[in-house]
Image (cartoon, rainbow, N blue to C red):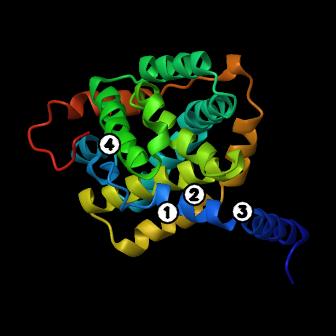
Amino acid sequence: MVSTSRQHMSTRIVISMTENPVAMTRLFQLISPSLPIGGYTYSQGIEWAVEQGWIKTEHDLQEWLGGLLDTTQLYFELPLLIRMMQAWQVQDLDALAHWNSYLLASRETAELRQEELNRARAFTQVILSLQPNAAPFRQQLIQSQHACFSFACTEWGVNQEQACYGLLWSWLENLTLSAIKIIPLGQTAGQQIIFKLSEKFPQIIAQACALQDDDIGASSMALAIASSRHETQYTRLFRS
């Protein structure tokens, strides 16, 4: 017997997909590993953490990613995505510039800032090839991948909640796939981690949507240390 909460969730998903099914295909395209923005080339400090023995097992990896999900994703990444989507909806470029600056200033290492800019440049080129009318906004887009993702979602009819699910999924899948190559772990272990952590998405997204501007901000000391040390790691498979 299906619980009432699951019935409600299933109904909501069906309704949101049938309201604009093309928008869902656009979202799938944005979060696909085949999107040529280089997401698979980054480990965000995990490579160094593995070398130092911080992450050795499936449990360690799940704890690492789960911790980031509860902090940086909840209090920083998702709220900024929401603010940027709201800015694009009314073409408030001043607000967009503010949140872009806030995002870049909050990247705690040179590697993380460079990753943001590298992905944004590649993402901008993809958007311009698919949406030529985005050309006047190029300078805003190349500031951050969040600006690009929020622009594309707004233009293609992806709503705020769907965009949040997409961003979380892309982040979790990319880092899990990177980590299982580094540790290494089996593909099944990676799928189990994604399966378990994705169950937290509804709660994380609901909390992120309710945050006020003054509540936005998060720091992960372990991530910052791992990323900064990775910059000078002797041998590397990943760019960060």
Q: Which residue was labeled with disc 3?
A: 20
Query: What residue sits 34% from the left and 43% below the top?
Result: 125
> Does 104 sit left or right of 27 as displayed?
left
Number of numbered discs overlaid on the protein picture: 4
**Crowding near the residue tagged with mark 2, few <14, some 14–19, many ≥20 C-alpha atoms within 10 Å:** some
Q: Are marks 1 and 2 in contact (CB under 8 Å)?
A: yes
Q: CA distance from mark 1 to mark 2?
A: 6 Å
Q: Amino acid at mark 1?
A: Ile
Instruction: Identify the residue shown where x is 29% and y is 29%.
Output: 114
Residue 54 lies in quadrant: top left
Q: Residue at x 44, y 61 (%)?
A: 32
Q: Amino acid at mark 4?
A: Ala
Q: Give the distance between the C-alpha atoms of the residues marked 1 and 4, in whole angstroms.
A: 29 Å
Quadrant, the C terminus: top left
- The answer to whether residue 204 is above or below residue 195 is above
Mark 3 residue element: loop
Residue under pointer 2: 197
Q: Splitting the image into 4 quarters, where does residue 183 fall? A: bottom left
Task: Tell me which numbered mark, 1 or 3, is placed earlier along the sequence.
Answer: 3
Cα–Cα gap, marks 3 and 2? 27 Å
Left/right placement of residue 222 relative to residue 182 reads right
Residue 193: mark: 1
C-alpha distance separating marks 4 and 3: 27 Å
Determine which residue is flagged by label 4. Answer: 122
- The CA span between labels 4 and 2 is 28 Å
Q: Please report contact status of discs 4 and 2: CB closer than 8 Å, yes or no.
A: no
Residue 197, image x and y in percent? 57, 57
Question: Given contact means CB atoms under 8 Å apart, are the residues at marks 4 and 3 in contact?
Answer: no
Q: Position of residue 55 (x, y in %)?
A: 34, 49
Question: Is the residue 82 above or below the residue 169 in the image?
Answer: above
Q: Secondary structure at mark 4?
A: helix
